[in-house]
Image (tube, rainbow, N blue to C red):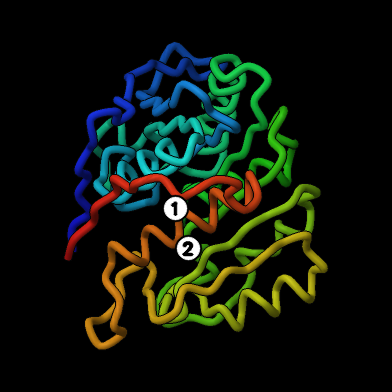
Amino acid sequence: MAFLHAPGNDAVMARRVRIRLEGAADSISGLVDAPRAASAALVLAHGAGAGMEHPFMSAVAQGLADRDLAVLRFQFPFMERGSRRPDGPAVAHAAIRAAVRVAAGRFGDLPLYAGGKSFGGRMTSQAQSQNPLPGVRGLFFLGFPLHPAGKTSTQRAAHLADVRIPMLIVQGTRDALGSTRSLQRVITHLKLAARLHPVSQADHAFHVPARSGRTDQAVLEDVIDVLAQWITGPPKRAARSRRVTPSI
């Protein structure tokens, strides 16, 4: 499965930035997708298996920019080093805080949101639960990794009880790392200010089988629309042409 981007004539071009980690000499890479008339900004963290330039991450960032949302992607330090072993929570949280600080400075008074794919989203909510991320109004998760594949624990979601801002969880109904039923129970049990959006027949990568009658492209478009509308509300004008073009 691959996610490709077919830019139009007015496509937003990603700009590279360096993000300094507080209290350290090191810095990490970032990419900014910023449309001219952005209505809000997002900090988008990648998952444990692929970095910020993975086609899925690029497609999401560019699709959000196409919907007038500014996006800052960044590399966790382990990915910057080329390691396959994800950073521990303290290091991951520091990277997220640094990215949020840069986004707040770059995007000024725009409403700011943070989250990401799988590991990136979970690390963001952990950071928020321990010490609120300055200026962040809501958290989003593109596939929440509730437990390892084949397990049924909900311990990874326990920290969400300490998050005091709205959350959006977009989850495939075939996600082996957390069923929508289990996540809904977590939301209800912890009394979270969270919305769960199930994606029919999608797995953890938001891939759908051919028998679903849908394409990965259509699914990804819907995922981006759900996230964008959660932040800005229903669109008030005719839909724009879309340039996110994933293909299997």
- Expressed as whole percent of the image width and height from the top left, the position of residue 22 reads 56, 17
In the image, 118 versus 197, the foreground residue is 197
Q: Quadrant of residue 101?
A: top right
Q: Among all residues in the image, which is located at the extreme front?
A: 238
- Expressed as whole percent of the image width and height from the top left, the position of residue 167 reads 68, 55
Relative horizontal placement of residue 123, taking residue 191 as reference (left or right): left
* Mark before the other along the chain sequence, 2 or 1: 1
**Which quarter of the image is occupied by the N terminus?**
bottom left
For residue 34, the mark is none
- What is the secondary structure assignment of the residue under circle 2? loop
- What is the secondary structure assignment of the residue under circle 1? strand
In the image, 197 versus 91, the foreground residue is 197
- Expressed as whole percent of the image width and height from the top left, the position of residue 221 reads 38, 58
| Mark 2 residue type | Gly
- Expressed as whole percent of the image width and height from the top left, the position of residue 56 reads 30, 51
In the image, 206 versus 245, the foreground residue is 245
Q: Among all residues in the image, which is located at the extreme top?
A: 25
Relative horizontal placement of residue 238, taking residue 124 as reference (left or right): left
Give the labeled residue for mark 1: 117
Q: Residue at x 68, y 20 (%)?
A: 109
**Which quarter of the image is occupied by the C terminus?**
bottom left
Q: Residue at x 47, y 15 (%)?
A: 20
Badge 2 vs badge 1, beta-carbon distance below 8 Å: yes
Q: Residue at x 69, y 42 (%)?
A: 128
| Mark 1 residue type | Lys
Q: Badge 2, how many Cα within 10 Å: few under 14, some, many 20+?
A: many
For residue 143, the mark is 2
- Mark-to-mark CA distance, 2 and 1: 6 Å
Relative horizontal placement of residue 84, taking residue 113 as reference (left or right): left
